[in-house]
Amino acid sequence: MAPATDVFGRALRNLRISVTDRCNLRCAYCMPEEEYVWLPRDEILNFEELSRLTDVFMELGVDKVRLTGGEPLLRRDVTRLIRLLAAKPALRDLAITTNGVLLAEQAPALKEAGLHRVTVSLDTLRPDRFLALTRRNSHAQVLEGIAAVARAGFTGTKIDTVVMRGVNDDELVDLVEFGRRAPAEVRFIEYMDVGGATRWSMEQVVGRQEILAHLAERYGAIEPLTETSTAPADRYRLPDGTVFGIIASTTAPFCADCDRSRLTADGLWYLCLYAQQGTDLRGPLRRGASTEELKALILPMWQSRRDRGAEDRLARRGQEPLISIGQLRQDPHLEMHTRGG
Ligand code: SAM
């Protein structure tokens, strides 16, 4: 079946499921505050409910699912959810985005449960910087986690690095070299002023051109790869064949191709990372809505989707943070760690 498309012809393909809003790190660009308002436990969807909603989305075109959070490996027994999802033959891609802290112990079980691919977030190779950035002393565990991914038999692994001026922008070459050895494809992400990034400033953003210029100084000519996929990263090849990516989500957003939507752990569905309103799917689901009824709720929302949140942000940037701390405390769904990065 052809996937549902929105007003701009963007397909409903890619569902990011935040399986928990809890996290075991406190990254300065995502969760910089001391106190957070957590989602009530009884509102968190169970695995059968998540699997059921995934089926509904798949009937409308979704064939890629990414588990995220919060930290998805904190969700108890997440491999059982992976098993349920991996059993769906029409699901072409089932991936997870993790900070890697719990990966060393869980990688073999994730593989065995049928997970296809792993993306690990890693912003620095220096333990002291990791501690300053995340306020947790778990750097060694993350490195062990990355090593465990290849050992467990995963391929297509990615490492996502948020580049911040004065924080880790002197580690680009080191991270490319680390990725080559892992092996994993490193993707440099521009620092975004999403909900939760209450300390964001444009001065800290290191844009794509600057990243490329920095790497070209060390490696020589960098070749852009031409691709047709809707993946957010622009990919490049170094003279030695190493491929890396840049997600220029702040200076050159990929809204035109965005096929992503997001489901929070308590069943709110968001059409855009920057959207202020989501659609409650938990209520209808728990009241016993049929698959057709759920599809009838989701389809018109997607068909009338006009969101181009990152582009709107680019046009209006520089005035105030996207969402104030006060608003975030009133509605934790506006947080990046709740709706899933
Ligand atoms: N805990 C998991 C992890 O760390 O990968 C999954 C959730 S985390 C919110 C997902 C991704 O969002 C991470 O790669 C993180 O670096 C990214 N992220 C969070 N805040 C960001 C920001 N302000 N700008 C760019 N990327 C951000």
Image: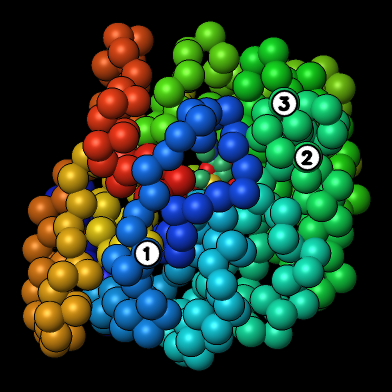
Q: Which residue is mark 2?
A: 137
| Mark sitting on residue 41 | 1
How many numbered callouts?
Answer: 3
The colour scheme used here is rainbow
Earlier residue among tags 1 and 3:
1
Q: CA distance from mark 1 to mark 3?
A: 30 Å
**Along the line of sight, the residue nearer the viewer: 336 or 5:** 336
Residue 49 lies in quadrant? bottom left
Earlier residue among tags 2 and 3:
3
**Along the line of sight, the residue nearer the viewer: 290 or 159:** 290
Q: Which residue is mark 3?
A: 132
Kindly identify the residue that appears in the image at 26 percent across and 52 percent down: 270
- Determine the quadrant in which ligand 1 lies: top right
Task: Determine whether 22 is above or below 30 in the image.
Answer: below
**Residue 165 visible to an observer of this rendering:** yes
Residue type highlighted by circle 2: Asn
Q: How many other residues sit within 10 Å of disc 2, few (<14), some (14-19) or many (≥20)?
A: some
